[in-house]
Image (cartoon, rainbow, N blue to C red):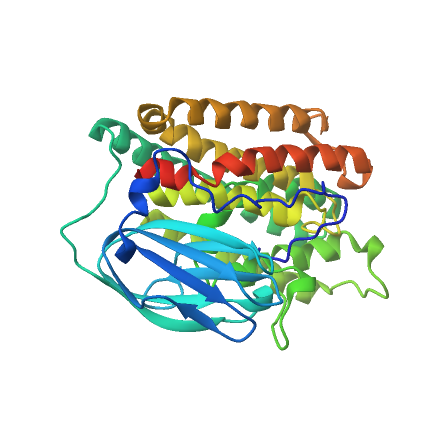
Amino acid sequence: MRKPLLVALIAATPLFAACTENADGSDANTSDDSRTIAVSSTDDKCELSATEAPSGTLTFEVTNDGSKVTEFYLLGEDGQRIVGEVENIGPQLSRQLVVSVPAGSYVTACKPAMKGDGIRADFTVKASDEEPTPAADDGAVDQALESYEDYVHEQAEELADKTETFVALYKAGKDAAARALYPQARTHWERIETVAESFGDLDPKMDAREADLEPGQKWTGWHRIEKDLWPQDATDYTPLTTKQRAFFADDLMSNTEVLERRIEGLTFTVDQIANGSRGLLEEVANGKITGEEEIWSHTDLWDFQANVDGARVGFEGLEPIIEQKNPQFARTVSERFAALQELLDAQRDGDGFVSYEQLSPDEVKQLANAVNALAEPLSQLTAVVLS
């Protein structure tokens, strides 16, 4: 679930501060001015340098000229499906979204303060003779797409299976068993979180945190049940009744089944895989590293690992393509994934992880620095793949 970036306990260097830089060899994607759209997001406006562009690889150069943290989205014609996004753009900072877009009607949105539907406008992509594709052999591309689709479908199936067991335990009042299964089930959500978030109607129902609720929004999903299972830190909390438990459990299961059905029909492009890997690491920076995602259960390190898993799988599927374009870039990303994994492994406890509360400030800082070190090259992944 998207949320504002916290800075407490995180290294002084801002996470993702270098995300506007391109890797060597990616200039081909931005040399055509018609394919580069400047976006200025303020507290009350979302101004684009153009409202139409040719199909193919587009680069949105997003600058936050306002006073609030903002986000930028390219949405499908329905205003729900997320084609591409950049999150947590602080005031006076810039971020780059590189995405391959076919001809059609779209919607752009800036979201100051990261709440609500955002400031929206129509955006048109016209058919073009230029349809940039990865300059790699077809076999490598086909293998990357097939492998990632299989991975996402498998994780969706596992999510549905474990959620079914979890909600049955919760409804039966078997709280200890439900608590044990909670982080295991959520692992499969977190591994494909950017895919799940692309369904804008489901994500708020399934993964909203209490602190992120908007006025009038009904709180449902994983974190509503989490609070009921771990109420020890809640003030004046009244446990849910058996009937209420059944309602929230059945609602979560129903939405999970909808998600699984939608994912069954999904196919992916290489830029979606690359942007998904980047987005998963942003999820780590935006919630897991700060301990705010699982505020009641403190199982954040499970989520942290799952986001890293998903990001790594996406990268490794694209690695044969990247090796053809920029071998040094591929080595750098691989090495930084390994360094981050070593720090995570140090916090393992049996088959899982220690409670986030057990981390010292120095350990949090080390993890944050490792995330930052990986984020810098990973932010260039899409540009490298599409170069």
Q: Is residue 261 visible?
A: yes
Closer to the camera in the image, 233 or 181: 233
In the image, farthest residue toward the left: 129
Closer to the camera in the image, 377 or 208: 377
Q: Position of residue 17 (x, y in %)?
A: 58, 46
Q: Residue at x 34, y 63 (%)?
A: 76
Q: Position of residue 85 (x, y in %)?
A: 45, 55
Closer to the camera in the image, 223 or 362: 362
Q: Residue at x 50, y 66 (%)?
A: 41
Q: Residue at x 62, y 77 (%)?
A: 216
Q: Quadrant of residue 149?
A: top left
Q: Quadrant of the N terminus?
A: bottom right
Q: Position of residue 241 (x, y in %)?
A: 73, 65
Q: Is residue 173 placed above or below 323 in the rendered structure?
A: below
Q: Position of residue 141 (x, y in %)?
A: 27, 32
Q: Is residue 208 placed above or below 22 in the rendered structure?
A: below
**Is 36 situated left or right of 171 in this image?**
left
Number of numbered markers: 0
Q: Is residue 122 placed above or below 223 in the rendered structure?
A: below
**Is 22 situated left or right of 30 in this image?**
right
Q: Residue at x 36, y 66 (%)?
A: 49
Q: Is residue 81 visible?
A: no
Q: Quadrant of the C terminus?
A: top left
